[in-house]
Amino acid sequence: MTESPREAGAEPLAVLIVGAGFSGLAMAIRCRQAGIGPLRVIEKADSIGGTWYDNTYPGAACDIPSHLYSLSFAPKADWSRMYAPQAEILAYLRETAERHGLMPLTQLGTTFQGARWDEAGAVWHVETDRGPITTRAIVSGMGGLHHPAYPTIPGRDSFTGPAFHTAAWDHSVGLAGKRIGIIGTGASAIQVVPELARIAGHLTLFQRTPPWIMPKNDHAIAERAKTRYRRLPLARRLERARLFWLHEVRAVLGFTRVSKLTGQAEAVARRHLARAVPDKDLRAKLTPNYRLGCKRVLISDDYYPALQRRNVTLETGGIARITETGLATEDGRTHDLDVIVYATGFDITATFARMDLVGRGGQRLKEIWADGMGAYQGITVAGFPNYFMLLGPNTGLGHNSVVSMIEVQVQHVLDCLKALRRGTRAIEVRPEAQARFLDRIRARLADSIWQAGGCKSWYLDAQGRNATLWPDSVMAYRRSARRARMADYRLG
Ligand code: NAP
């Protein structure tokens, strides 16, 4: 259900939450439980769900186990599989929002355009495409992975057939029997390739960099286990804890810096490749030449088999241009196609570049961040009182469930919102606390695998700095950020 936007001049909201994906919904639930209001969630799409509403490509699923990739305070006992498909995760988010009474507070189809801090009134004046909103605090649950990135290949607009991005799937296009070209071999591509290979007349996959791929071992969760999780919440919590520590240990020991374990993990991935792909030439094309962990480590059991189907070709020569009828590769060959699928990832800087946030003294967030993004605990920025980010800079994860990070951040923000409820008009991180935090993580990032692993990835910005990932364990982040230390904030 939607309500009409609040008129300028009406009593301000206590909190405006932007985005109704995992982050925004988690924040809204916690605010309601803490009695913080009036509260509103705005969402640009016509449904809640965030990334799980946008990404409907065939094969879309989560590569983190479902019992871990869900909110600890909104558990689901009957996940169908170890790694739930997109539709089930979306249904979970919808049910969770309904159960916690969030729908009446949620205004769909409303895009956040920017906000200006009003020092005298200690409120934010927010602009949306459906009118202004005044609020004491803003929590951004916008995430970074929702503006599809299209490659800058010459001739991209000249292709006359259907062409679309994995995150904006065109379900009206029939793909059975078609000649399909897929560009990209990241987390989205390896899920969609096996699905399209089954139905395509011919599928050509254009790879620039081969990913490291570990076995997935996905399976349906037995009815017995579901019943046990339903009857014994402790059993479900233990399963979640088991999965958490499995990912945590793997990450701390092997996936954040080059270590002995990196080599061991690479050996596992190489064996996986060798078992799956007997052909030496194809195996060579699929063998990465950078360290495992430098890019997101992928998991799949059906990607390598799909590449060996008779109707599938892997092209590793660079793409020279896109033509009216397909693609031309740098080796001079042309590839006639009926459909092009861009599995080319997201433009994370676009999210921030598009919104205009004007803080204290007229300073603009995008100008402050022109040389690189950064925030205290990834959540708050000096000069921007009462503005909080979920999954902000340096709080992404490549190795564990981001939902664990979101829950830490939600707790931190709640501490700040409670301070506002106790009569504080504005809460703003002290610049020196922010600088100390950023120095600490930048030092830790210096020898991280993303910097030293010999690859290029979207984790690094144009200057080669990593402003996307948390460089440590989830537990370390929990210790660092779970409680908002009031000494690091200026309360006014
Ligand atoms: P991605 O990891 O950024 O992969 C993009 C792919 O497109 C890469 O293989 C890249 O090659 C290729 N590419 C980009 N421009 C190209 C060009 N001009 N020519 C040829 N190839 C080009 O994007 P994604 O697969 O959508 O994944 C993005 C993120 O979304 C993931 O890291 C993850 O955080 C999230 N995700 C998660 C799941 C999940 O199951 N949890 C699933 C999907 C996505 P290079 O490697 O050479 O750059």
Image (tube, grey):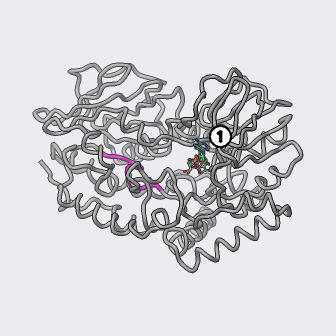
In the figure, 235 relative to 78: above or below? below
Horizontal side of residue 271 vs 128, given as left or right: right
Residue 20 position, x and y percent, is 47, 37
Residue 197 position, x and y percent, is 81, 42
In the figure, 461 relative to 231: above or below? above
Picture residue at 36% right of the left edge, 55% below the top: 411
Is the CB atom of the residue marked by disc 1 within 8 angstroms of ligand 1's nearest atom? Answer: yes
Horizontal side of residue 65 vs 357, given as left or right: right
Picture residue at 60% right of the left edge, 62% below the top: 233
Identity, as a three-letter code, of the amino acid under mark 1: Ile
- What is the crowding at mark 1: few (fewer than 14 residues within 10 Å), some, or many (at least 20)? many
In the figure, 253 relative to 24: above or below? below
* Whether residue 400 can be seen here: no
Picture residue at 22% right of the left edge, 31% below the top: 116
Towards the viewer: 172 or 320: 320
Query: Circle 1 sits in a helix, a strand or a loop, which is it?
Result: strand
Quarter-of-image position of residue 322: top right
Q: Mark 1 points at which residue?
A: 319
Q: Is residue 114 magenta?
A: no
Residue 379 position, x and y percent, is 32, 51
Quarter-of-image position of residue 152: top right
Picture residue at 10% right of the left edge, 33% below the top: 120
Q: Which residues are the magenta region?
A: 388-396
Residue occupying the far bottom of the picture:
260
Towards the viewer: 283 or 401: 283
